Amino acid sequence: MQLTKDQLQTINQSGLSRHETDFNYLLDKLLANGTAVEDVITRLADFQVAIPSWALGAGGTRFGRFSYHGEPASLEQKLDDVGVLHALTQTAGAVSLHIPWDIPTDYAAVRERADSLGLKFDAINSNTFQDQHGADHSYKHGSLSAGEEGARRQAIEHNLEVVEIGRRLGSQSLTVWLADGTNFPGQRNFQRNLLQTQDSLQQIYAALPDDWKLYIEYKPYEPNFYSTVIQDWGTSLMLANACGDRAFTLVDLGHHLPNTNIEQIVATLMLKGKLGGFHFNDSKYGDDDLTVGSTKPYALFLIFNELVYGMRNNPQNPDLAWMIDASHNVKDPLEDLIQSLEAIQIAYAQALLVDQEELARAQEAHDVVRCQEILQDAYRTDVRPLVQRARLSRGGALNPLHAYRKLEVRNELIRERGKHTVATGL
Ligand SMILES: [Mn+2]
């Protein structure tokens, strides 16, 4: 199923006059504050977030999975779903694949399809957290950190295969998330695990094409509960430094213990030029994989505030790879992703409204109250008309969720695919 700009324009009609009123009201206010409104809208319109191929079907927990009808069953159908999201929101212009779930059979056809939908292939993801059918070695006791040379070699070679697949699709970065760790004290040797992991990552890094980047993701716990080899940003940064200039830390919002100051991590990594990628989601406890901005929208804003500061002040940090990494257990996955994309755009817009110079002056004067006022004034601004304006400028939907329901996209997908399809990797 593909949505056309004409279809969206027709649906947009009924909301345009309301939008104009809202936009002009906000414009008046922002211009009075000296905000460069056109620049904010351009930045919002240019901001593109990758959708991972595994987020297009219903997620699940270790207790069960409740299927959502009309899910994509092939790589091509996954691309089509991202195409729908991109047509509606104009901010999902990339897809992030996962190997072995998404190995193309016809590379040229897959590239062509993505191209026709306006999608790029962003970071590609390897998988050494589960055993594949017929594999020679098991990852039960580790992959890149494994003590058994066979398992470790197999994990390294898998990552190299993933790079080759990504290269053929036009991707330019590899994301490694390791499930390696232990469930019990004494189970394995911490130092040996870390050294083996470092050596494996260095081997993968050495084999990357010159224009590729390596993103090293971290996570404090789960699936292992006593220790995780790459447990935090410091360990990831240390490993990235051990690899080289094109290796970076990847921050996944859900991969922190409750109350971790993620915005400070972002600031530190960008200062060091080592923040490479970013996975959006929200959580209450840990890696809950909830809709972005659904639980802690102010924290998301504060993180974006540091991202915006870093993008303006840290030329040493490369452009970031943005991705949503969420699971949809009780919502239509596409509706959930539309909500996440909207939340990301809103937080970004709010952060763009922060008067950084005034904030710096208030900080210098130790005017703590004013510092808070500056941040919260931006956060409490209803920026939705700006986000809408950015979408309209690219031919997207004024209100993506409304258009999605009005066009009965899910029913159409069920008609096309049937009720009981299941996406690979889900
Ligand atoms: Mn992630």
Image (spheres, grey):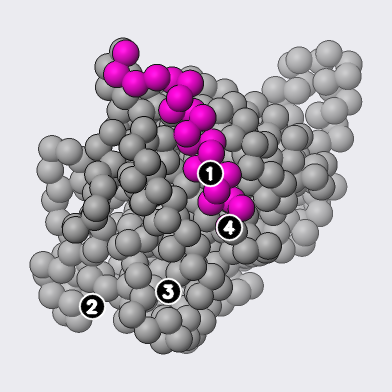
- Compared with residue 237, is residue 401 higher up or lower down, i.e. above or below? below
Q: Is mark 1 within 8 Å of ligand 1?
A: no
Under mark 4, the amino acid is: Ala
Q: Is residue 55 visible?
A: yes
Region in magenta: 186-207
Tell me the mark number nearer the camera, choosing from 2 and 1: 1
Can you identify the residue that label 2 sits on?
A: 412
Can you identify the residue that label 1 sits on?
A: 201
Q: Is residue 350 visible?
A: no
- Of the 4 image quadrants, the one containing the N terminus is bottom left
Q: CA distance from mark 2 to mark 1?
A: 44 Å
The x and y percentages for residue 124 are 47, 59
- Residue nearer the viewer, 101 or 282: 101
Label 2 Cα neighbours within 10 Å, binned few <14 / some 14-19 / many ≥20: few
Sequence-earlier tag: 3 or 4? 3
Q: CA distance from mark 4 to mark 1?
A: 10 Å
The x and y percentages for residue 37 are 76, 56
Under mark 1, the amino acid is: Leu
- Residue nearer the viewer, 342 or 124: 124
The x and y percentages for residue 258 are 43, 21
Q: Would you say the magenta stretch is mainly helix, strand or loop?
A: helix
Sequence-earlier tag: 2 or 1? 1
In terms of image quadrants, where is residue 71?
Answer: bottom left
Whether residue 338 sits left or right of residue 421 in the image: it is: right
Circle 1 SS class: helix
The answer to if 372 sits in the magenta stretch is no
Q: Is mark 3 within 8 Å of ligand 1?
A: no
* Mark number, residue 207: 4
Circle 2 SS class: helix
